[in-house]
Image (cartoon, grey):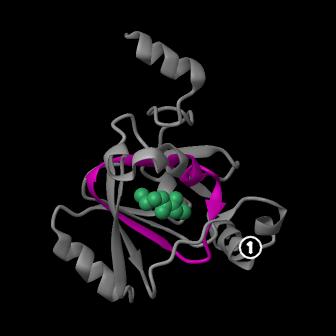
Amino acid sequence: LTLEHVQTVLRGDQRAPHDSGREVTPDQLPKLGILHYNYPDVSAVNALASERGYKNRDEITISPATMGDVYEEKVKSFFHEHLHEDEEIRYILDGGGFFDVRGKEDDWVRIQLEKHDLMIMPAGIYHRFTTDEKNYTKAMRLFKDEPKWTPLNRGEETDENRYRREYLQTRDS
Ligand code: KMT
Ligand code: NI
């Protein structure tokens, strides 16, 4: 136990493994509409992308070394609770991180992603992302069309969003 760890616990560091309380049980993710795989070979990612009609991709390296001064800002912005109007597919090329998603009771469920994990999140799910204490996430982002990342931060408007409503209908039926 180091001073650093004590400080981390006291301030509830978003990059700590248990910031969000509960750990994930394997049956929890499918119930929330989330798919989670581990693909050591990128050819499996290519196959999945073509099956689902994903034509574009890019790579992002989230780390102080690649982002410099804006790193902390970026990490904060990814950690704002948001939804997207499209599925979000992420493949971890190196390093790791956490996606937190809202469970059925609107609780946070923390999903740890490690190298070669691929996660598919449905449109309309509230979530947030953070690097872990190693501060290094290299990820492939898959897009059906042009690479764009449009987070809609949670608020009254997103509660009425049709993708949000459709997500809840599917999840709770
Ligand atoms: C998201 O939607 O939160 C992100 O795309 C985070 C960065 S990709 C690991
Ligand atoms: Ni997102």
Measured along the vertical axis of the image, is residue 65 above or below residue 162? above
Q: Nearer the viewer, residue 85 or 103?
A: 85
Q: What is the x, y in percent for residue 43?
A: 17, 76
Crowd around label 1: few <14 · some 14–19 · many ≥20 (10 Å): some
Tell me what residue is drawn at x 76 percent, y 74 percent: 161
Tell me what residue is drawn at x 33 percent, y 61 percent: 139
Query: Is residue 30 visible from the viewing direction of this image?
Result: no
Q: What is the x, y in percent for residue 21?
A: 56, 33
Measured along the vertical axis of the image, is residue 171 above or below residue 103? below
Q: What is the x, y in percent for residue 57?
A: 35, 77
Q: Which residues are magenta?
A: 75-103
Q: Nearer the viewer, residue 139 or 54?
A: 139
Measured along the vertical axis of the image, is residue 16 above or below residue 140? above
Name the residue carrying label 1.
165
Can you tell me whether the CB of the residue at mark 1 lies under 8 Å from the nearest atom of ligand 2?
no
Tell me what residue is drawn at x 58 percent, y 23 percent: 11
| In the image, residue 93 lies in the stretch drawn in magenta | yes
Tell me what residue is drawn at x 15 percent, y 67 percent: 41
| In the image, residue 66 lies in the stretch drawn in magenta | no
Tag 1: amino acid:
Arg
- Judged from the image, the quadrant occupied by ligand 2 is bottom right
Q: Where's the C terminus, which quadrant?
A: bottom right
